[in-house]
Image (cartoon, grey):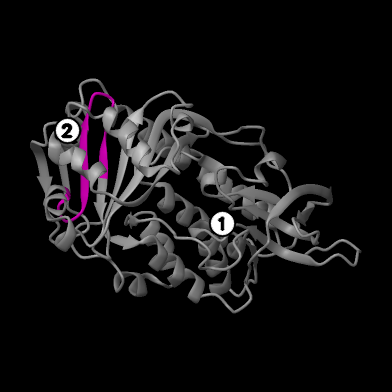
Amino acid sequence: MSTPIGSAPSTHTPHHPVAVIGAGLGGLTLARVLHVHGIQAAVFDLDASPDARTQGGMLDIHEESGQEALRAAQLHQEFLAKVHPGGQAMRILDKHARVLREEGDDGTGGRPEIDRGDLRALLLGSLPPGTVRWDSKVTSTRPVGGGVHEVTLADGRVFTAGLLVGADGAWSRVRPLLSGATPAYTGISFVELDLLDAEARHPEAARLVGGGMLFAVGDDKGFLGHRESDGSLHIYTALRTAEGWLSGIDFTDTAAARTALLAQFADWAPELRRLITDADGPMTPRTIHALPIGHRWERVPGVTLLGDAAHLMSPFAGEGANLAMIDGADLGRSLARHAGNTEAAVAAYEEKLFPRAEATARESADGLDAIFHADAPQPLLDMFAAFDAA
């Protein structure tokens, strides 16, 4: 039986035909593609405002996924105007800071770089005012019959949704409606650092990183870095280590945290160690989690997932944001194509979602093993050589 978007229970509780939980790139892409097709969505986000927190660093947006989503959103030209020239450059170094592979960026590559904040602002600015409901933290969700779900927010507000879309990331409050899976630690921990105004204040580090991405890896650890569009360098010091290692470091004491981190790179090149010693401001610890490869669920009427809520994976295929955006675009296009039959639309979307996410999660796991390897950087060099030969 077809289920039209917008079926509402007979209640005074506010009802939204399409409710999207999470105003990240995937949720916003979905809302924008629906808007392009004349379908209204309500987006709920726990942040107090669009500027409540920083949005992270640079993203490479892939031709076949993120850029395809932007075309579906009718925002591709606006995106191209915001890309970071030179951002597709890459360097691979060993622990002695020897350059083993270097690629330039002549502007012809298919993965241009953009600041995550700029991309999110582009999507937000393309939506009708009031589409995103800020300061709306979801605390619980439950089915109420007929494919309709009830959502409760932290401030006590309640609403129902004809289609509830979980775009709410790794620790999704919507996912338990579909799956009992939870993210597991991948064995990799990050400490994030920034070197500000790099050309003027940190010229050695600026030369080391180059114009785009840096991989300096070995001994199951390394430095992953990127030049940002504001001239800063964003560095991830990354280690294969026990899950509790970060919790044993007091990151409120930056000097002590720096000492603990330097101890992990005691025999690395001085210029690489200086990425830690010269970093500006506090350091941010982060453990890397992933859902099981091939995560999927049985069709449940009136609810689905996209992005990290559906297929959280490690960042070592560079696909997280791209997948979230193409998920959002595909779901939006499917809802428009199957107007009046939400279940057919969502089933068609999930039929594309599952195999694509599984294949990419395997690539991500392979990338993790290539970077964090006792023989690194050779497995990483071999992986790029295989890409060249393909």
Label 2, residues with CA under 10 Å away: few <14, some 14-19, many ≥20: some
Range of residues picked out in magenta: 209-224
- The residue drawn where x is 59% and y is 57% is 22
**Left or right of 57 on screen, residue 128:** right
- SS at circle 2: helix
In this rendering, is residue 146 above or below 14? above
Residue at 58% over, 78% down = 128
Query: Which residue is tagged 2?
Result: 381
Q: In this view, does 97 lie to the left or right of 2?
A: left
Q: Position of residue 309 (x, y in %)?
A: 57, 45
Task: Identify the image quadrant of the C terminus.
Answer: top left
- Real-space Cα distance between discs 1 and 2? 36 Å
* Magenta-drawn stretch contains 245: no
Picture coordinates of residue 258 (x, y %)?
A: 32, 38
Could you tell me if the residues under marks 1 and 2 are in contact, i.e. CB atoms within 8 Å? no
On screen, residue 289 above or below 154: above
The residue beneath circle 1 is 331
Q: What residue type is labelled 1?
A: Leu
Compared to residue 246, the image places residue 3 above or below, namely: below
Left or right: where 162 falls relative to 89? right
